[in-house]
Amino acid sequence: MSSILDQDIKYIAGVGPSRQQMLNKELGIMSVGDLIEYYPYKYVDRSKVYTINELTTDMPFVQIRGRILSYETFDMGIKKKRLVAHFSDGTGVIDLVWFSGVQYIIKSYKVNREYIVFGRPGIFNNRFQISHPDIDDVNSMTLDDMGLQPHYHTTEKMKKAGMTSRSIERIMKGMLQKLPPLRETLPDFIVRKHHFISRDEAIRCIHYPHNQYEMQHARERLKFEELFYVQLNIVRYVANNRKKYKGYLMPKVGTAFHEFYHNNLPFELTGAQKRVMHEIQKDMNTGRQMNRLIQGDVGSGKTLVALMAMLIAVDNGFQAVMMAPTEILAEQHLATIQEFMKGMDVRVELLTGIVKGKKRTEILDGLANGDVKILVGTHAVIEDTVVFGNLGIAVIDEQHRFGVAQRAKLWGKNDNPPHILVMTATPIPRTLAMTLYGDLDVSVIDELPPGRKPIQTLHKYDNQKTSLYEGIRREVAKGRQVYVVYPLIKESEKMDLQNLEDGFRDLQEVFPTYKMSKVHGKMKSAEKEAEMQAFVRGETQMLVATTVIEVGVNVPNASVMVIMEAQRFGLSQLHQLRGRVGRGADQSYCILVSGYEISSETRKRLDIMCQTNDGFRIAEADLKLRGPGDLEGTQQSGMAFDLKIANIATDGQLVQMARDEAQEIIARDPDCNLPEHAILWNRLAELRKSSIDWGAIS
Ligand code: ADP
Ligand code: MG
């Protein structure tokens, strides 16, 4: 269905070939439809006109109305000129200043004609001035222009070519004036239920609100709509899968589970673990495929719960696989599982990229003939060459969140898709989970095993190293071990490695009697492994490392985590690192070391770390501070994350509303064929076609 919205932007007045190129390349705007959804990021109130004698230096933006008295140019070095227009409204004189485009300005704005000038006032040589102001002919300004002025993001390249927010505003305005009324994209019952304004009104008001009230209404309607279609897509996807696939029934709790639970489990499960275990068991016994996310803080015992789910699968004649993001972590999972399953007659194997030759063939054979019951590994386990006799459950321990597409790969490993259990490495806020993991049911382990002392977190500056070293000495004297972590960022890899080497040498000088391990990403796998193992076995007191230790390693005897240049880590990363200590019964410490000069945002981050150990609170704060776009995993999520106006961090309520609405609709119309919903399915199809992101769910 072709409409005016599909029309190329080159047909819009004011968009010549060069601007067309610019909008295409810099902003991805190709069609009229793209353009109307290029929303302003802020508005400036232009409803008030100031007089020059009212101006003060603390005004952000002002609008004045007057005439140019004269122009003056000043030479500023070779070929550089400064142009000044003396401008007056009868109450005083200010200078309008330009550093480029001198000829164009003189030609465009005539002396003695009346203009409205807009910009940020400053003081220079005791006189008010506005540099690079917006200037409009008084006669060309309509009442509409005197409301809230939209501001649009432009890129550096666009600015250099003279294409500013103002240019976009003008193009938008001209286009909207000629645009016929827009088709409604939400069903009437939703619009009425939530008292939304129409799409046509919303689009026009979002670009040209006359007042705050109109702007708010437009934003609300457009945000909801955006979130709603994301949710509808997810909820429909889930419903479709339920119809399409049967899930394996696993009613039996048998020998493997009982042996483990009664003979091998050395402690009592926490209440939260028991609750989640029940949720999982119920899922595995419905005939539907389980798709469940286990959320829980580091150390809350997710792995154990996953293991029990795998044992139930084994008891019912199925195989289980656990996939970890790194080799080290996969190996550690294997070790943990083997330890927990000592003396049990269940074959467990490890498959990673480095398992090759005869060993690999043996494992693959064992998987195919059903002899291997539990497989632990990395991405290697989803390769096409890995064939299971009867896979019943797949556990994904996620550091780097898998997208929907990757998860779907596991689905193909048996006739019916196996049950899927996803464990997040760090908690994520509920509203984000609803979008990022919207296709999964969520279980939360919100309780730590008893006896854990909360980790004490301190922030220290570089120049407080003496007291830091004191603390380390005290802990090591008690027989404890210490992590010292340096950041390693790809862009500054060389310098970061140098920092690590320097730091390592310094520490050796400060603590000449300690044995130390050193681990970084540039080391050979075997070498890394050896260093790490020495620390795990307690042969070294200190592990100096880049962030490679972030995932995995479990050394309950380690009681101190020192994070150097802590300002360079994100909140969830810091929390994840901190979770490496506090695994035993003793008091543990996390020391965040930073330079003295840090931004206020960084300070907030470090403060939050010192205030709380609660991963959920930290995740919320992280989302608020950074926004969802920067959060790890959002890019790979495969769920439409290219939000144009809604913000998962701040629009949590709308996310919930959108999800509720989507669920009600699917419940009422599971086959998606009620006539009053036609508008929804058409719109969804349209959206899915227009964006690659949406295609990830099929
Ligand atoms: P997570 O995967 O959530 O980070 P793990 O499953 O690795 O947590 O558990 C962390 C540590 O706590 C492990 O050493 C594990 O054996 C132990 N643990 C798990 N559940 C309990 C419990 N209920 N009581 C005591 N210790 C537990
Ligand atoms: Mg774990």
Image (cartoon, rainbow, N blue to C red):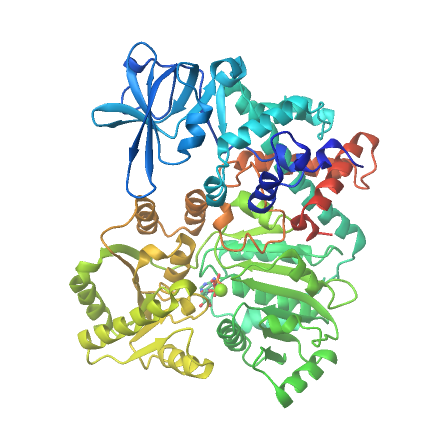
**Which corner quadrant of the image does residue 54 belong to?**
top left
**Which corner quadrant of the image does residue 132 belong to?**
top left
**Which corner quadrant of the image does residue 422 belong to?**
bottom right
Q: Is residue 455 left or right of residue 104?
A: left
User: Farthest bottom residue?
Assistant: 358
Q: Indicate whether 236 appears above or below 265.
A: above
User: Farthest left residue?
Assistant: 466
Residue located 24% across and 56% down the image: 595
Residue located 20% across and 70% down the image: 473
Which of the pair 128/652 is nearer the observer?
128
Which of the pair 308/135 is nearer the observer?
135
Image spot of residue 140 (x, y percent): 53, 16
Image spot of residue 614 (x, y percent): 40, 50
Q: Is residue 520 left or right of residue 681?
A: left
How many dots with numbers? 0
Q: Quadrant of the N terminus?
A: top right
Image spot of residue 354 (x, y percent): 56, 81
Which of the pair 332/83 is nearer the observer?
83
Image spot of residue 466 (x, y percent): 16, 64
Q: Is residue 455 left or right of residue 325?
A: left
Q: Is residue 180 left or right of residue 210?
A: right
* Residue 220 in sight from this viewpoint: no
Which of the pair 17/567 is nearer the observer?
17
* Residue 90 in sight from this viewpoint: yes
